[in-house]
Structures are given as C-alpha cells and as structure tokens.
C-alpha cells in the first residue's frame, strides 16, 4: 500500500480507469461474439449491421488506447474477411 498521499490518489484513479477500460473491452468482445454467431447462422443482413457496429466498437477501443491500433486493424480485417466469405461464397 502507498504511504504518500499523492500515491494513494493515484491508486484510486487507476482503479476507476481500470474499470472503464474493462467495460469498453468487454463490450467490444461481446459485439465480436454476436457478429461471429450471426456469421455461424449464415444471416447476411444481421451480420452486415453487426459488422458496422462491431467495427465502430473496435475503433472506439483503439481511440481510447485500450487496444493497439494495429490490433484494431487486424481484428477489423478478420471480421471483414469472414463477412466477405459469407456473402460472396454463397
């Protein structure tokens, strides 16, 4: 435990930031799971709308620094690739 007053304040701030980051990351992962389940079902319209929403969530997480921008680009690329496979292979 910190002894200095400013260090105690930093601990509190870090806890609140950690909770915020966790919620954003969790929401992002939830959207990815929903999109992947729509892909598994083969629902083109639902997966298209979920793709847009999911990419927006990934961009938000990258903008806030929760995930690296290259990680965000990689995730978006993989999601788009799976969507394109669903749409153009049928």
Image (tube, helix red, strand yellow):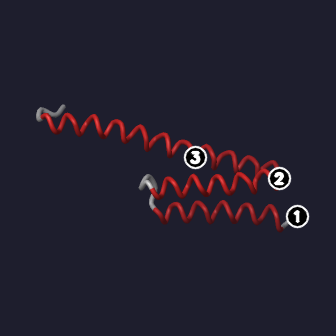
Please indicate whether residue 40 sits to the left or right of residue 4 in the image.
right
Q: Residues within 10 Å of mark 1 (few under 14, many from 20)?
A: few
Image coordinates of residue 31 in percent, x first then y, are: 63, 47
Q: Residues within 10 Å of mark 2 (few under 14, many from 20)?
A: some
Residue identified by numbered label 2: 42
Residue at the far left: name it: 4
Quick one: 83 or 48, which is closer to the camera? 48
First along the sequence among labels 1 and 3: 3
Q: Residues within 10 Å of mark 3 (few under 14, many from 20)?
A: some
Residue 37: mark: none
Quick one: 42 or 13, which is closer to the camera? 13
Image coordinates of residue 30 in percent, x first then y, are: 61, 43
Q: Are marks 1 and 2 in contact (CB under 8 Å)?
A: yes
Please indicate whether residue 16 sits to the left or right of residue 86 in the image.
left
Q: Residue at position x 43%, y 40% from top?
A: 20
Q: Residue at position x 59%, y 56% from top?
A: 56
Classify 85 as above or below 46: below
Q: CA distance from mark 1 to mark 2?
A: 10 Å
Classify 19 as above or below 86: above
Residue identified by numbered label 1: 90
Residue identified by numbered label 3: 29
First along the sequence among labels 1 and 2: 2
The residue tagged with tag 3: helix, strand or loop?
helix
Q: Residue at position x 69%, y 65% from top?
A: 81
First along the sequence among labels 2 and 3: 3
The quadrant in which the N terminus is found is: top left
Please indicate whether residue 24 sits to the left or right of residue 50 in the image.
left
Q: Residue at position x 44%, y 52% from top?
A: 66
Q: CA distance from mark 2 to mark 3?
A: 20 Å
């Amino acid at each position: 435990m910190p002894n200095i007053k400013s260090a105690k304040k930093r601990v509190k701030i870090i806890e609140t930031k950690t909770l915020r980051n966790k919620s954003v990351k969790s929401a992002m992962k939830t959207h990815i799971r929903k999109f992947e389940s729509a892909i598994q079902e083969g629902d083109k319209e639902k997966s298209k709308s979920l793709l847009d929403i999911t990419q927006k969530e990934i961009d938000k997480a990258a903008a806030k620094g929760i995930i690296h921008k290259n990680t965000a680009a990689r995730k978006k690329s993989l999601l788009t690739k799976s969507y394109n496979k669903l749409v153009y292979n049928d």
